[in-house]
Amino acid sequence: MLRAIRLIATLMLSVIVVAAVAWAAMAIWFDGPHSRILATPMAAGLVIICIVLAAAVRPLLRGLVVALFPVIVVALWWTAIPASNMREWATDVARTARATFDGSKVTIENVRNFKYRSETDYDQRWETRTYDLDRIKGVDLFLSFWGPTEIAHTIVSWDFDDGQHLAISIETRKQKGQSYSAIRGFFRQYELYYVVADERDLVGLRTNHRGEQVYLYRIRASPAQARALLVDYLNQVNQLADHPEWYNALTQNCTTTIRGHAQNIGAGGNLDWRLLANGHLDELLYQRGQIDTSIPLEELRSRSNITEKAKAADDSPGFSARIREGLPGISG
């Protein structure tokens, strides 16, 4: 029995060590020296050292534990890499928003409201806007699909009874010439960025210029809950303006970060696989009764697809109102 337990422990630890060494080698490759001439031998050297330690130290179980020591060193270095707001940023993420509160009024600097002719051709418009938190009447969730239906991009937007809407998209802050890579998203390659924007900017960019399919759902939340959520978002916006953080494709992405904000106001829910495979997020919200459940989910999805409405609305003054026409759960 003891021998069987030792064998199982050895196999389990072997899997852990292989995964940990692979992660550490990639961390060196992605986040270490910019020169591939230096990064390649450093990553390979780490792997060789870990293999030698595992093979040289007996018994094997102890060797596997010792082989983790270099990984721990890499992890300590990696966690100490500082994020920064001082880089040569791509123009669409060049400015950070900042919110100033005065009673129920909040003034936000650098609200993005670009005028797009194509995804890469646009007029930059960074605006200062003031909103009355007492006039929030609801909060909405956009799901935007660019290809695979298992994964979507999520955007949260607040609806005010004076006709204003404020959308916030949690994204990577890319430098000039940098593109997004799903693998790099797990490492320290992108700062975390909150795009505080007009809905026509965030949604119209996706439907009209990127060819994405966008769905809009009204979240069942009281005005007080919607307000608390926005305040929590804006507090984080201010925090990032002063103390930048890293984006992470698993722990700090467009959806897991939303859940973190919801938890902060006491509305977070249990962990669920659909928070990661967020193309199914509407299914999770439907099961939890957090979006309209008066009709079957498939019908709700069909009626919530606002792609063609957004294309038709384009630059019209009533963009936000037009994409909401006839949507379940949203009254005028």
Image: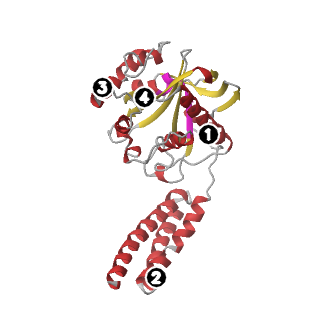
Q: Secondary structure at mark 4?
A: helix
Any part of residue 98 in sight: yes
Task: Name which of mark 2 and mark 4 comes first in the sequence.
Answer: 2
Q: Give me the residue at 46% from left, 48% from top.
A: 249
Residue located beneath label 1 in the image: 236
Task: Name which of mark 1 and mark 3 comes first in the sequence.
Answer: 1
Any part of residue 94 in sight: no
Q: Give me the residue at 57% from left, 49% from top.
A: 246
Residue located beneath label 3 in the image: 295
Where 246 sits versus 91, above or below? below
Residue type beneath disc 3 = Ile
Residue located beneath label 4 in the image: 206
Magenta-span inclusion, residue 166: no
Q: Quadrant of the N terminus?
A: bottom left
Q: How far is disc 1 from disc 3 in space, using C-alphas?
A: 36 Å
The spot of residue 150 in percent (x, y) is: 33, 42
Task: Name which of mark 2 and mark 1 comes first in the sequence.
Answer: 2
Choose between 253 and 102: the one closer to the eye. Answer: 102
